[in-house]
Amino acid sequence: MTSLLFLVGGLALLLVGGSGSSSSHSMRNFYSAVSEPSQGLPQFIAVGYVDDQPIARYDSNTKRKVPVVPWMRKVEQDDPLYWQRYSQVLQGWEQQFRVDLRTLRGRYNQNSSTGLHTWQWMYGCEVGPDGRPRGGYWQFGYDGEDFLTLDKETLTWTARVPQALITKERWDKGPEAQRFTAYTKEECAEWLRRYLDYGNETLRRTERPTVKVARKERSDGQETLVCQAHGFYPKEIDITWTKDGEDQWQDTFHGGVAPNSDGTYTKYVSIEVEPNERGHYRCRVGHNSVLETLDLAWEEPASNVGLIVGILVGVLAAIAVVAGVVYCMSK
């Protein structure tokens, strides 16, 4: 079951998998409420993302929606009351989420419970390279488990747990599915296109990956070859191990794409090989920032013999100079 834990910090990135291709873009909003805020954790948090970059946030402590990237200030040029208006909208959602939490605790027979409970909502949309809508996302979670999701094909709701059946039956009879679908195709897509214009230099930039291949010896006599791509943007990247030109998908372990502090990403893939076959393997990397696929093999590190000899010669020369000075002074 897909987890919907996206409470604080970069939690939303657990669900943000990026767009279907490097030329498409997505917008996702994550709302989360907790039953018992503690240690400074707000009772309600809302974070908006374009692609995988946070652009704005709201929490119940400040009661204000604020930008988290400089280019989001450009929205004020087209809509001077944007931040004020959406702060009020999110204040309304904050109150609604508190009501929802009380209702859900009743359904789960948790009214007497003092533990921490969470209610989450993720929604958003995607547009293709031509700016046309490609679909949307609409799902709810309770205590880290899927609760209710919208089937975009049938425009019906899917209850992931028995406690969601009441909501499913009520929403299947109402206009919620049609209203949410219309939102993702129209209003959401329009805002996404605006945000892409505001953050064009950041969101549509490309950063070339730095690729390194490392080797690790194993206790069983085999070796692990690790190919790491670092510092690339956008997030989508293809990294493949090949043996004599043939892809080795089944034997390859793929690590997840991890964000870096500068807004770029890191990813690695590894494969177990026999030491005598090491030279048959190559790492291929494809990314939107490079015209041709990068192709690298593991290389033996350069010998340190020359460096060591140079250091020894330098040390001996220094000793000779010191000895000469001492000799002259003794004379």
Image (cartoon, grey):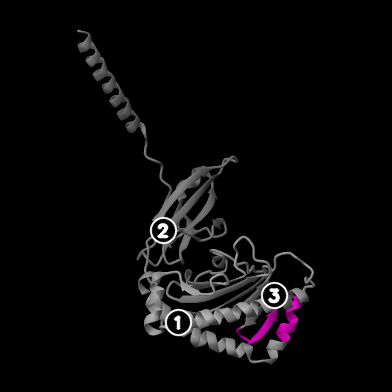
Q: Residue at x 45, y 47 (%)?
A: 279
Label 1 element class: helix
Q: CA distance from mark 3 to mark 2?
A: 41 Å
Instruction: Note whether 213 is above or below 50 in the view shown.
Output: above
Q: Amino acid at mark 1?
A: Tyr
Q: Which residue is mark 3?
A: 101
Q: Which residue is mark 2?
A: 231
Q: How many marks?
A: 3
Label 3 element class: helix
Q: Magenta region: which residues?
A: 152-169
Determine whether, in the image, residue 200 is placed left or right of residue 12: left
Mark 1 Cα-neighbour bin, 10 Å: few <14, some 14–19, many ≥20: some
Q: Amino acid at mark 3?
A: Leu
Q: Quadrant of the N terminus?
A: bottom right
Instruction: Note whether 190 is above or below 279 in the view shown.
Output: below
Question: Which of 303 and 115 lies nearest the eye of the viewer?
Answer: 115
> Taking the image as drawn, is residue 125 in sight?
no
